[in-house]
Image (cartoon, rainbow, N blue to C red):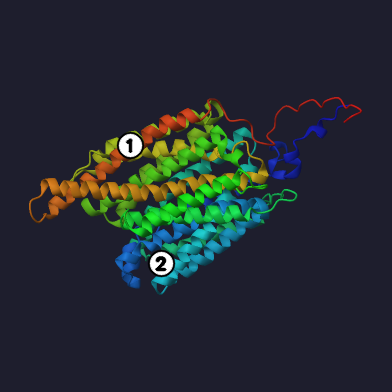
Amino acid sequence: MIVATQNADPASERDPAAAGTAGAEPKRWLILGVICVAQLMVVLDVTVMNLALPSAQDDLDITNADRQWIVTAYSLAFGSLLLFCGRLVDLIGRKATFLIGAGGFAAASAVGGAAVNFEMLVTARACQGAFGALLAPAALALLTTTFTDPKERGKAFGAFGAVAASGAGLGLILGGSLTSSLSWRYCMYINLLFAGIVMLGASLPMAKGVRKPGARLDIPGVVAVSGSMFCLVYGFSNAASHSWGTPSTWGFLAAGGVLLLVFVLWQARAAQPLLPPWLVLDRNRGGAYLTMLIVGACMFGIFLFLVYYMQMTLDYSAITSGVALLPMVVLTAVGANVGNIVVMPRFGPKPLVIAGLLLNATGMALLTGIDVDSAYASALLGPTMVAGLGMGFIFASVLRTGTSGVAPQDAGIASASISTGQQLGGAIGTALLNSIAAGATTAYLDSHVQGRPTPAQFHLAAIDGYTTVFWWCGAIFAAGAVICGTLLRSGPLPSPVGAPGPVPAKLPETAGS
């Protein structure tokens, strides 16, 4: 006798979150709202302090050499601990790590807002990064395992992708607004509001997750990859603020490369690897992680140098610079939702990634037309909207593809791999693009200026540096469209584990079974 219920997916039996809509959690859309708020809190803090740095520097008497550490401390802790925390999500449980991450992030933000000196602020920023590294993979893992019905999954990832893709831009808008109207300290205190919403959402029936029997943490892998990510992020950050030739740059980069090689070799032979090789070697997931690395590297070409141009050349205020990016943020949200709801179910991630990267390349090429007195409507609005739409397409496909085909017990490490690619790409991009801009600016002054440069010549030299960066970003995006488009498979993604579908017939039992 064939009983259909005996053929239920084992993953669904192990984890209620892996069930289809028939047994779906009625409050899942409220859970999605809580998850999106948590993700917004994490991504906002990547950039929310950027426009507040001068104000915090004056208030706490921070030197120019130390100022960058307020941003770097967050990136170092976040990037170094992502894979480790991603595996903790799978071992401890998604809901527990989600709440620990939110509570710790709130506490660190309160300390940072009340900081009385540089040491207190930079320590709080590092703690924010550490708890953010726990919160980010937990949020995406909860999303992945809560929504398995294909139609609902598209809408959920559309909302989450819009937040993830536009968070950096929203951070600039919020940071500029709070700094101009209140104080830089509210760039920290605002997280208490977000964290309060997340903690209130703890009463919702989120799936806790079930640990694999006999699963344990890969300690050598944790040490190797955390050390590697720390050295690489620090090395690239140091190159951005100093030079490539200093021992603190190339020494850390060399150490990071060696530790990364050790980590890769160890994962191939470890009994329970921290990052299973099969996770990365899948063409779709590998293509998603590579796409996020490229986007992370070139996003700074938009946010960092475009803000420099608006504030230093066009003399925009902090709040005006943030509002100028609002149309880009809106188009990013539109692209993420259209991509996830309309395109992904029919065509899969490949056309979205190719179109998104090419749109970003086009936006970068259009931005090279800026001048010392460019008008916002004619020189900035169109290119940033094109790039925003491309960013939405990319995030719509990458977040969903990077966690596809993964059992609930590995959702945390898969989610962390996406964030790791973006974070490492950001560190690489900041260093490379700063070096390119500085080199182009110096070359312009050497070839166009005799004697002491005038302020107008300094502006022209800076613009030459910005446009050179935009050309490089456009070229990288275009090359990424070819490479990632070739790597990704054509067609829709397979149904997630536990999604509703036909029940396979049970094989006849035999005496040997």
Q: Which mark is residue 271?
A: none
Q: Position of residue 77 (x, y in %)?
A: 49, 59
Q: Residue 182 placed where, x, y %?
A: 37, 65
Q: Amino acid at mark 2?
A: Arg
Residue 507 image point, x, y percent: 82, 25
Give percent across and percent down for residue 455: 13, 55
| Amino acid type of the residue that numbered disc 1 sits on in the rendered structure | Gly
Horizontally, residue 426 falls left or right of residue 455, namely right
Other-residue count near label 2 (Cα within 10 Å), few / some / many at <14 / 14–19 / ≥20: many
* Badge 2 or badge 1: first in the primary sequence: 2
Which mark is on residue 474?
A: 1
Above or below for 306 versus 394: below
Residue furthest bottom as drawn: 116
The residue lying at 76 percent from left, 41 percent from top is 13
Position of the N terminus by quadrant = top right
Q: Residue furthest right?
A: 511
Confirm whether residue 66 shows in the render.
yes
The image quarter containing residue 268 is top right
**Which picture quadrant has residue 6?**
top right
* Mark 2 or mark 1, whichever is nearer to me: 1
Q: Is residue 177 visible?
A: no
State the CA–CA distance, disc 2 to disc 1: 36 Å
Figure label count: 2
Say which residue appears at 60% left-offset and 55% top-offset.
220
Residue 219 versus residue 353 in the image, above or below: below
Q: Residue at x 57, y 50 (%)?
A: 137
Assign a secondary structure to mark 1. helix
Q: Which residue is mark 2?
A: 185
